[in-house]
Amino acid sequence: MSERANIRDVAAKAGVAVKTVSRVLNGHPYVSNDMRDRVEAAMRELDFRPSVAARILSGAKSNQIALIYDNHSPYYMFQIQNGCWSRCQKDGIRLLAQPVDVADPRVGDQVRGLVTETAVDGIILSSPVTDCEPVLRALDALDIPFVRISPGTNHALTSSVFMDDAQAADDMTTHIINMGHRRIGFIKGHPNHHGSEDRLFGYRRALDRAGIAYEPQLVADGEFDFDSGVAAGNYFLSMANPPTAIFAANDDMAAGVLAVAHDRGIDLPGALSVAGFDDTTLARTVWPPLTTIHQPMFDLAHTATEILIAGGDINHRRLPHTLVERASVAPPVRKPA
Amino acid sequence: MSERANIRDVAAKAGVAVKTVSRVLNGHPYVSNDMRDRVEAAMRELDFRPSVAARILSGAKSNQIALIYDNHSPYYMFQIQNGCWSRCQKDGIRLLAQPVDVADPRVGDQVRGLVTETAVDGIILSSPVTDCEPVLRALDALDIPFVRISPGTNHALTSSVFMDDAQAADDMTTHIINMGHRRIGFIKGHPNHHGSEDRLFGYRRALDRAGIAYEPQLVADGEFDFDSGVAAGNYFLSMANPPTAIFAANDDMAAGVLAVAHDRGIDLPGALSVAGFDDTTLARTVWPPLTTIHQPMFDLAHTATEILIAGGDINHRRLPHTLVERASVAPPVRKPA
DNA sequence: TCCTGTATGACACCGCTTGACATATCGATG
DNA sequence: CATCGATATGTCAAGCGGTGTCATACAGGA
């Protein structure tokens, strides 16, 4: 009881060959129902757990996949991990969550180490590792299947899952315009994240379509964190003719703008509308709750895992976003002149 | 180059016995410096990566540990994971982050599966898995070392790392009292999290010491999430004689109170002080930024991992908390009567 | 009767560690 | 100086717990 049962014990108990147990274990086709039942009973009785190590060593699949990430947003990573998880669980696949530093010159090596040492069957890359050349090269050389979540460079060589950042930004900008705003500030995202450019693109496209001239001074740099949102907020609200609405490329920065506005005693959302992007927990938590774009992180990860597990051909899947309207975007109130 | 090198290749390349390479690999004492250098050079040249699987199978340590959690706070888990990570990395130890559901009757089984299948060397339990009987029993039976982060039941049988929840709550309550408040509401945490009780205890102790009578109607139930904070906020602010300050057992609930206050147009922090607990990103993000207790999650996890890796005797370590003062707690302003 | 599909078994092998032994060198000890 | 113990390396075989390959056996259809 205390000693751990191995496949031979099971075979003995069931009175069959070791190989047969192995067949049952792996769902091999040529096994009679009788036999399967008998073996499974023996396994249950002995509380048999196949050793992953032994399996790997003998050249089989490891039933393990790795999620490689380098993202400093807790909420984002939590969702991504959970998405991968939920899919893995269904097939009893083990998930190794592996943080890396894309700026470290040894990333390629680390990834190679991970793959060869743990013998994972496949890899999921989350942004921005999706566009880390050394990692991509290592993975190619290793000849291991991988799928990328929200990659930037969309070369057709690998499967990927993503949302339409440009369209989403366009949607939001249009929404703001429809509320009656004409001067709309935009805060860009971190330059190493590809989505940033797309979001800016969508903002400009919506402006264009509405016949509103693009003003470069209404676009501020940002890095996806609260502090850069604060900085951008201060920049905008110090202008002689500040925008009546600010659209930040993610929720954290939007929260920063909100903080600045509160600090300056600006009436929200009357005197200033603020929109976010991502729909993290922050969006609901902050005051006023953020009108934002819901990025389906969980689904993105879930789908990526699905594709990886299914194997097969290269697959690109776009997932839908939604604009979630809360209280932070409203029609501008004219100052009583 | 493309074929993966094994220990025999290394031995051949270095012109030594396989056994010697193994000795180097495992830091065996009787190896000369010359030899070690030679072998290591060969390993580097061949880009040799010892197979973890083979190692495990032959009875050695796996150099893998698992972090088992069931916590729905992204920020908390992010910090915990990172803390474990940073320590593991130093020793080249692989970390398996494994979510479970403490309410699932099969948790014990799942944990047993994890341990026997992956052959991890040790386990870190984060709250509330720290107090999940089936898991604890499984681990005991498996005879595998584990350490607990912020456990409730503090039986001396296993190592643990924690903070002084009661003292922290006491500190905060005292801080609020010192600001001039006498009617202080408290929002309890989730009942399955042991820290909840301790925090309530600290609140009462501080009240006692200050000679303020404990009023049960000033204590509301909560579940550590934003919504329960909103509910509690509404409860308090609907009272005929509402508290002038509210101390929530975590930041999320404090944010909920803030939202209610904003909604009702209550002046913050003048008419209502709000304090949180944990010092998550939320605390800085919200308006006004929360005065809160900094819980050293990263350090907790780092230390837990340290203890696990070090092995040795049972060890209980208390880590210091700090009260971080931001803007959400201020002296009450008397209403102009 | 021969062949093909189904069902089971025997056995080597994956890459590494470990233990039992065999040597060999080197200083210290009596 | 002979001897002994500590240090340093090698040989060999066994084994960890599975899976792949190949062989085998029996069934029914052509």
Image (cartoon, coloured by chain):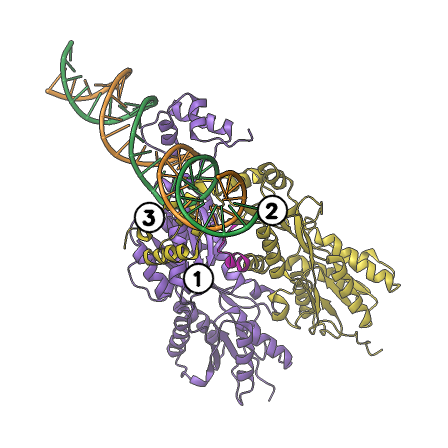
Chain colours: A yellow, B purple, C orange, D green
Q: Which residues are magenta?
A: A85-98
- Mark positioned earlier in the residue sequence (1 or 3): 3
Of residue B20 and residue B316, the one placed in the foreground of this image is: B20
Which label belongs to residue A175?
A: none
The reply to whether discs 1 and 3 touch (Cβ–Cβ < 8 Å) is no
Which element is circle 1 on?
Answer: loop
Quadrant of residue B320 within the rendered picture: bottom left
Instruction: Give how far across and how far down residue A319 sits, in percent.
Output: 68, 60
Which amino acid, mark 2? Answer: Phe
**Residue tagged by mark 2?**
A146
Instruction: Give how far across and how far down residue A327 sits, in percent.
Output: 69, 74
Res. A323 visible in picture: yes
Viewer-nearest of labels 3 and 2? 2
The reply to whether discs 2 and 1 touch (Cβ–Cβ < 8 Å) is no
**Residue tagged by mark 1?**
B321
Disc 1/disc 3 C-alpha distance (Å): 26 Å
**Residue tagged by mark 3?**
B311
Disc 2/disc 1 C-alpha distance (Å): 42 Å
Disc 3/disc 2 C-alpha distance (Å): 37 Å
The reply, left or right, for residue B287 in relation to residue B199 is right
Q: Chain of mark 3?
A: B
Of residue C7 and residue A25, the one placed in the foreground of this image is: C7
Crowd rating for badge 1 (residues with CA inside 10 Å; few <14, some 14–19, many 20+):
some
Decide: is A180 above or below B336: above
The reply to whether discs 3 and 2 touch (Cβ–Cβ < 8 Å) is no
Which element is circle 3 on?
Answer: loop
